[in-house]
Image (cartoon, rainbow, N blue to C red):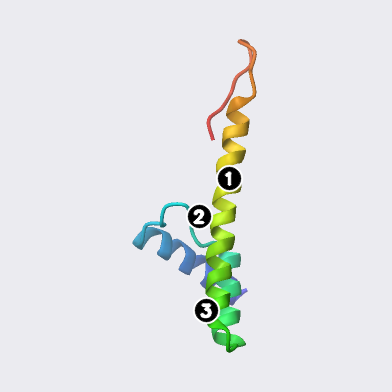
C-alpha cells in the first residue's frame, strides 16, 4: 500500500512539474511502478532497451487514444441525442 501511495504521489508531482512531450501520454502509476522495478529493484544490463520500450508504449497509447477520440467524433448523432465532450 505504501509503495502504491508513493507511486501515485510521484505521478501527480511529475505531471505538475514537467509537461508531457508531444505524442506521448503522461507517465501512469503502472508505468512508474514498472520502471522502478526495472531500474532499481531488478536492474538489468540492457537499460536502453527498457527505456526505449517505455517510450514506445507511451507513444502507442497516445496514438490509440487519439484514434479512439477521432472515431468517436466521426459517429453521426441524432439531433435529440446529447453528446458529451471527453
How dense is the environment of label 2, judged by Cα within 10 Å: few (below 14), some, or many (20 and up)? some
Quadrant in which the C terminus is drawn: top right
**Mark 3 sits on what residue?**
48
How dense is the environment of label 1, judged by Cα within 10 Å: few (below 14), some, or many (20 and up)? few
**Mark 2 sits on what residue?**
25
Q: How far apart are the alpha carbons under marks 2 and 3?
A: 20 Å
Residue closest to the eye, 28 or 10? 28
Q: Which is in the foreground here, disc 1 or disc 3? A: 3
Nearer the N terminus, badge 2 or badge 3?
2
Residue at (59, 61) in percent of width and height = 57
Q: Are marks 2 and 1 in contact (CB under 8 Å)?
A: yes
Residue closest to the eye, 58 or 13? 58
Residue at (59, 53) in percent of width and height = 61
* For residue 12, above or below residue 39: above
Q: What element carries label 3?
A: helix
Nearer the N terminus, badge 2 or badge 1?
2
Residue at (61, 66) in percent of width and height = 30
Which label number is shown at residue 75? none
Which residue is outermost to the left?
17
How dense is the environment of label 3, judged by Cα within 10 Å: few (below 14), some, or many (20 and up)? few
Q: Is residue 22 left or right of residue 42?
A: left
Q: What element carries label 2?
A: loop
Q: How far apart are the alpha carbons under marks 2 and 1?
A: 9 Å
Quarter-wise, where is residue 56 in the image?
bottom right
**Mark 1 sits on what residue?**
65
Q: Position of residue 42 (x, y in %)?
A: 62, 87
Q: What element carries label 1?
A: helix
Q: How far apart are the alpha carbons under marks 1 and 3?
A: 26 Å
Amino acid at each position: 500500500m505504501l509503495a502504491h501511495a508513493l507511486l501515485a504521489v510521484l505521478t501527480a508531482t511529475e505531471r505538475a512539474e514537467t509537461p508531457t512531450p508531444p505524442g506521448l501520454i503522461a507517465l501512469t502509476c503502472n508505468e512508474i511502478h514498472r520502471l522502478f522495478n526495472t531500474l532499481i529493484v531488478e536492474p538489468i544490463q540492457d537499460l536502453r532497451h527498457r527505456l526505449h520500450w517505455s517510450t514506445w508504449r507511451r507513444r502507442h497509447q497516445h496514438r490509440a487514444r487519439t484514434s479512439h477520440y477521432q472515431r468517436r467524433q466521426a459517429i453521426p448523432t441524432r439531433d435529440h441525442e446529447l453528446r458529451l465532450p471527453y
